[in-house]
Amino acid sequence: MSEPSDEEIRRFMEKYYPEYADNLELGRILYKRFMKRRRHTGGGARYEEYKIGELQPRMRVVVQGVVIEVFEPFEYEGCAVCRRRKCNNPNHRGRKVWVVDGFKVSDGTGTVFCSYIHGKDEEGVDVEEGDVVRVYGFTKLYKNDVEITADKVEIVRKHPDIQEENGSETETGSATEPVHTGSAVSGNIDEESLRNFLEAIDMFGKLKKSLVPQILQRYGLRWEDVSDYLEVIVEDGEEWVRLKKTR
Ligand SMILES: [Zn+2]
């Protein structure tokens, strides 16, 4: 949804880089670099849409991706105003127990740890692995990694309920069922999971190949289940996967 269409890219390229106008892949990169980013407002603050791989410290951002890991919430005591453990501001009064909900989000260009801090008596974020989310927040550097301190987390789509679907696998497969190649573990691919996985890849556009195993695991799939639908490309010395172009 947030991705510009091929037509948009083509128009942009014909205007600014006509000699490369038929290179959509390059167009997509240039478009994101130079076109005005879509802006979002939330609680009066402005958030700019970024891919996770583009994040730098001290940016107000919104990213969209799949939750690939959720951590146990933890508590700490800090300033009731600024939430710092050690607060030097003489105008800040009171201490409070804060709860940190932490999770990792991946969008195909990278993975980022996100935290959402709230009071013990306030509602936290209720995300689960496999959910597609939008995270609004501020980036900071922590041990050489960029993290997002979230102001708001929206769930775009819940993860597939694989448990429930396995319960109804007595139904015979449809004619379009993909063919398995010799695997010791037999069993049907969950078509809903496969569809959700392919939708996620489609949303990413392309995904670093090194991130694929994590994503597959979240959807209960194996590489053999999806390899027929994907192609591997090499860009900047990095391997990426994307959906095979049909037709
Ligand atoms: Zn303070």
Image: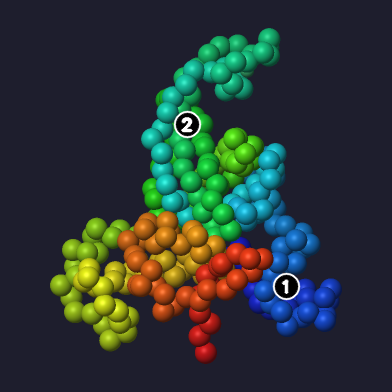
Quickly name the residue at label 2.
100
Mark 2: give few (<14), some (14-19) or many (20+) Cα within 10 Å.
many
> In the shown orientation, is residue 106 left or right of residue 221?
right
> In the shown orientation, is residue 148 left or right of residue 39?
left
Question: Which one is nearer the viewer's eye here, 165 or 181?
Answer: 181
Measured Cα–Cα span from mark 1 to mark 2: 40 Å
> In the shown orientation, is residue 87 left or right of residue 37?
left
> Residue drawn 51% across and 31% down?
117
Ligand 1: does it lie within 8 Å of the C-beta at label 1? no
Figure quadrant of residue 3: bottom right
Labelled disc at residue 168: none
Question: Which one is nearer the viewer's eye here, 17 or 48?
Answer: 17
Q: Earlier in the sequence, mark 1 or mark 2?
A: 1
> Residue drawn 50% across and 85% down?
246
The correct choice, above or below, for 184 with respect to 140 in the image is below
Name the element at disc 1: helix
> In the shown orientation, is residue 25 left or right of residue 180?
right
Ligand 1: does it lie within 8 Å of the C-beta at label 2? no
Q: Is residue 37 visible?
A: yes
Residue 123, horizontal then vertical, whole percent: 43, 33
Q: Amino acid at mark 1?
A: Gly
In the rendered view of the protein, which quadrant contains the N terminus?
Answer: bottom right
Q: Amino acid at mark 2?
A: Val
Residue 35, horizontal then vertical, whole percent: 77, 63
Quickly name the residue at label 1.
27
Residue 227, horizontal then vertical, whole percent: 41, 75
Mark 1: give few (<14), some (14-19) or many (20+) Cα within 10 Å.
many
> Residue drawn 43% across and 51% down?
68
> Residue drawn 59% across and 35% down?
143
Question: Which one is nearer the viewer's eye here, 128 or 40?
Answer: 128
